[in-house]
Image (cartoon, helix red, strand yellow):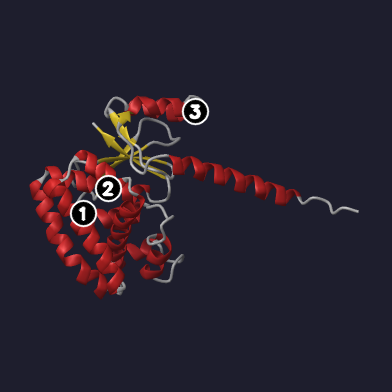
Amino acid sequence: MTAEADPMSHDDNVIAQMDQISKDIANKSPLVSEPEPVENLKSEYTQNHGFLAKIEHLTKSYSKIRRVRGDGNCFYRAYAYTLFDACKRDAALRDRVFKKLDTTLAWLVQLGMPSFTTEDFHDTFVETLKNHCDSGTYDSLMETFNNDGMSNYLVVYVRLLTSGQLQQDSDEYLPFVEGLYKDMKEFCDKEVMPVDREADHLQIKALTECLSFPLKLVYVDRSEGGPTELVIPDGSSPDVSLLYRPGHYDILYD
């Protein structure tokens, strides 16, 4: 007599298969794509009129989108790419960022980060940014950010900077996670440093404050009206815009 099939087991298998299909599709996309018209987003929402209406609004203010692979690192990768690109074009920003980066290794080690590995990530980040600012091109920047090893090294360092800022200013940030985590270090260990953890508002605010490189977030969701725009930190004047759709970030251009 054969055992009766467990319907829950079947459902779990279906979910696992769908997850794997999604991962396979994501892994075939570039880490950072070439820009394409924002209009292209419409084809993704032909059956969702709420989203489609917001994309229509979006096309009135933005012309291009640069897609970033949805692998859990999309915010950090998008932020790092826009930082490198902006530093190449803006000497004042470049000087300010390098001045800050010069202090971050000792700062992170003092906060308890392992010195050997932190130094490795720090030196790679600073050297790569310096090389891009000195002699990099658009093509070399795209090559850097689409090289899995190098791109992920850069992502890890911006995650470390985010963790450092959150822990340094834990009195400011801890009230938002109290009751869920015993302290800010536990929050960072579970929600910032793992490579599959996407960023939320706390992480974004901490990173933009750490590097004094603000951004505008443009939200597209199911709510009524046009896209919602949020400047981080408050009162700043960012030159960079990221598109946020639930669970994912891409780069927007005017």
Toward the viewer: 111 or 57?
A: 111
Q: Earlier in the sequence, mark 1 or mark 3?
A: 3
Residue occupying image coordinates x 49% and y 40%: 25
- Residue pictured at 61% horizontal, 45% vertical: 17
Helix, strand, or loop for circle 3? loop
Q: Earlier in the sequence, mark 3 or mark 2?
A: 3
Q: Identify the image quadrant of residue 160.
A: bottom left
Helix, strand or loop under label 2: helix
Q: Which residue corresponds to the image point at 43% horizontal and 64% vertical from the top-left? A: 190
> Does any portion of residue 201 appear in the rendered image?
yes
Image quadrant containing the N terminus: bottom right
The residue to which callout 1 is attached is 128
Q: CA distance from mark 3 to mark 2?
A: 36 Å
Label at residue 144: 2
In the image: residue 240, left or right of residue 68: left
Q: Is residue 177 above or below residue 216?
A: below
Separation of residues labelled 2 and 1 (CA atoms): 9 Å
Whole-percent x, y for residue 148 in the image: 36, 50
